[in-house]
Image (tube, grey):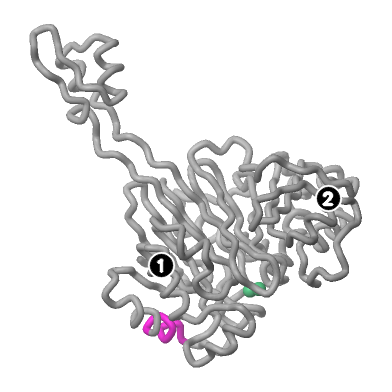
Amino acid sequence: MGIELHILGTSSARPTSKRQVSGSLVQCEDGIAVIDAGEGFQTRYAAQRKRLKLFDKGTSLRAARVHVVCLTHGHLDHTWGLLPWMHTMSLDKREVPLLVLGPTSPEAFDSLCAGTGVPDSSASAELARQITGWQSLGGTSAELGYSVRWVLGDVVNDRWMELNDDGSTSLLSSMPQPEGWKRNKLHPLPSNHSVPSCSWMLESKGSLGKFNRLMSAELRLSDEEKLRLSSGEDIKRVDGSLLKATDFRGEDRPGTRLIVSGDTSEMAESLSTVGGVDVLVHEATFMDDAQQWADQFQHSTSTGAARTALAAKAKHLVLTHFSARINDANLPVAEAKGVLAESGIQVTAAMDGDRIHISNSGSITHRFWAENGWKA
Ligand SMILES: [Zn+2]
Ligand SMILES: [Zn+2]
């Protein structure tokens, strides 16, 4: 199955006639993570499920498989659809627990821990403000009928806390991973924006190749011999023949890394140093002619996203989060290609409804939504 990202919104700040605000789902064998849920998220999510039903019966994105919501930051184009969708899941009698993760500032973290609430100096879009507001609007386990954990992180210092339904906070020893996830891990990567923010990386563990049972049966190996070979040990048999462990293994399956950047200026340190990235979905709010705006509002240009992809050693860069000024996404792609020319890094632009797939063997496909199905 691998990893598949469904991108449900590709505009920045406000919807346009063709693009909606941020929101995506990433599906792996352990379950589904929602990464950001801007205004209208549940409508777009339902539309994507309907498309899958019509055009790709093998795939489903059931809400019961969504175990975690990862927010990149508190700007409303990334968060404002979360609570209404959570209410809908309550009407649908959801039973599965939901974990919500997001970044906060060190100051807000300290103040919340001390029981003095969100400091006045915090940004209006501070996530802690929204979460406490949502709790008072019915976003609690008791009112929703399923377990919700609201977890905030001072991501830069890797400190984590839970905002409890009764208004108290609990310090956590580390960021919780979704319950029951075994092969996939979520990592927040601090990014540079006008409010506390982070990118989210889904890392899927690699695995050893399959043990060749047929060959071991033909050679009538003992259980002990099989165990030693499968653990990577070469063995010498009684008849003097040498059996090499590598001859009994199929090819190893490499681990995979998918990053969704959220909003950030280019070359966020955590992104430019992480390395070994398969797919980097990076914001490209502006084109090169608006570099000053990108600097002023801490966003990226298409070439800035490309420079970050180079530094991250990404295999594939997907541009998203376009300003309403960008009518033709071929233009930012062309600009990014100028930076990536010699690198071999692929670059594509996302439209609402697109799917990015990384197979278990590491091959990457961008499937573009085209009104009556997806086209690679
Ligand atoms: Zn945004
Ligand atoms: Zn933002």
Rendered-image quarter of ligand 1: bottom right
Relative to 313, is 173 above or below?
above
Dot 1 amino acid type: Ala
Residue on which the image places disc 2: 113
Q: Measure the C-alpha gap from mark 1 to mark 2.
A: 36 Å
Q: Secondary structure at mark 2?
A: helix
Disc 1 crowd, CA 10 A, few/some/many (<14, 14-19, 20+): some
Q: Where residue 241 sits: x, y (%)?
A: 9, 15
Q: Is residue 207 left or right of residue 224?
A: right
Residue 254 image label: none
Q: Which residues are magenta?
A: 328-334
Q: Position of residue 276 (x, y in %)?
A: 39, 56
Q: Quadrant of residue 333?
A: bottom left
Which residue lies at the image location 73% right of the left edge and 53% below the top edge? 152
Answer with left or right where residue 190 lies relative to residue 57: right
Residue at the image point whose x is 59% and y is 51% from the top:
33
Assess disc 2: are there few (<14), some (14-19) or many (≥20) residues with their C-alpha within 10 Å of its C-alpha: some
Residue 93: image quadrant is: top right
User: Which residue lies at the image location 77% right of the left edge and 42% below the top edge?
Assistant: 146
Q: Does 310 lie within the magenta span?
A: no
